[in-house]
Amino acid sequence: MDDQPGNDDAAIAQCVADVHGERPLRLERQAFAHSGNAVYRAHMPGGRSLAVRVSPKAQTFLHTGANLATLHGLGLPVQTVLSQGTTPAGGDFVVLDWLPGRDLFYVFDSLDARQTERIAEAVIEIQCRVAQQLPATAQGSFGWTAIGARAPRARWTEIFDEPTPITSHVATLARADATPLDRFRARLGLVAPRSKTTSTHCARSAFSTT
């Protein structure tokens, strides 16, 4: 992942220093951020790394710390919010611990079908565990809010697009000009859970509040 030098990075580094008490030596922009957030790996003194998530919208991470703490209590391997604050432009940011490991993007092509199925099954098991042990979202709504609270959307498709048809994923993999990211998304989209009904219910319940 490429470094992204510039004034924005300098401002983010200063934000981290203001709330965390230590300025990053270097910020490394992460490629697969989502939902309009920018994600950085902050290289800190002493060889440590932290994660920094930045949103242009105010109060984006209002419930992140509490929600992650709740999920951690269920045994999920989630991050911990170390500090948070507001950007000079009025956006929101959080500083989290850096979880070790490799992004699936870099190993997906080397996995066989059974290995990808195991990954999908592990994700579904976690989704179901959360759905069974945490309170249901009020009125069945979706979006980012405190766990158990009413979320602002009626359907996930108000936030994300409708699921991509399987034929489209197959066509993407056959294209010579498909980007690595397009190929990754296509392969992930073709990993079918064992039980679509159960996994869809658990996924919707689990991720409607986080």
Image (spheres, helix red, strand yellow):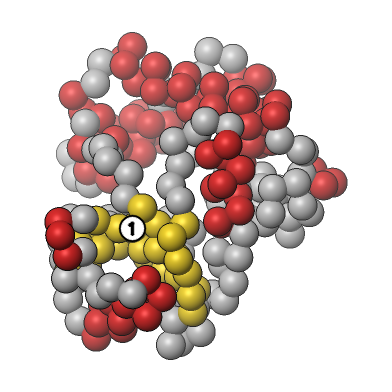
On screen, residue 6 versus residue 99, left or right, reads left
Which element carries disc 1, helix, strand or loop?
strand
Q: Quadrant of the N terminus?
A: bottom left
**As displayed, is residue 148 above or below residue 82?**
above
Q: Return the residue found at the far right.
A: 139
Q: Residue at x 73, y 59 (%)?
A: 152
Q: Nearer the viewer, residue 175 or 27?
A: 27
**As displayed, is residue 162 above or below residue 65?**
above
Identify the residue position indicated by label 1 in the image: 51
Q: Residue at x 20, y 37 (%)?
A: 106
Q: Residue at x 44, y 81 (%)?
A: 87
Q: Residue at x 61, y 43 (%)?
A: 70
**As displayed, is residue 200 above or below residue 64?**
above
Within 10 Å of disc 1 (Cα), the crowding (few <14, some 14-19, many 20+) is many
Q: Nearer the viewer, residue 185 or 50?
A: 50
Give residue 20's position: percent from left, percent from top.
Answer: 37, 71
* Residue 99 visible in the shown view: yes
* Residue 159 visible in the shown view: no
Type of amino acid at the residue the image marks with label 1: Ala
Give residue 42's position: percent from left, percent from top.
Answer: 25, 63
Number of labels in the image equals 1
Give residue 126's position: percent from left, percent from top.
Answer: 54, 27
The image quadrant of residue 29 is: bottom left
**As displayed, is residue 44 above or below residue 23?**
above
Give residue 37's position: percent from left, percent from top.
Answer: 43, 64
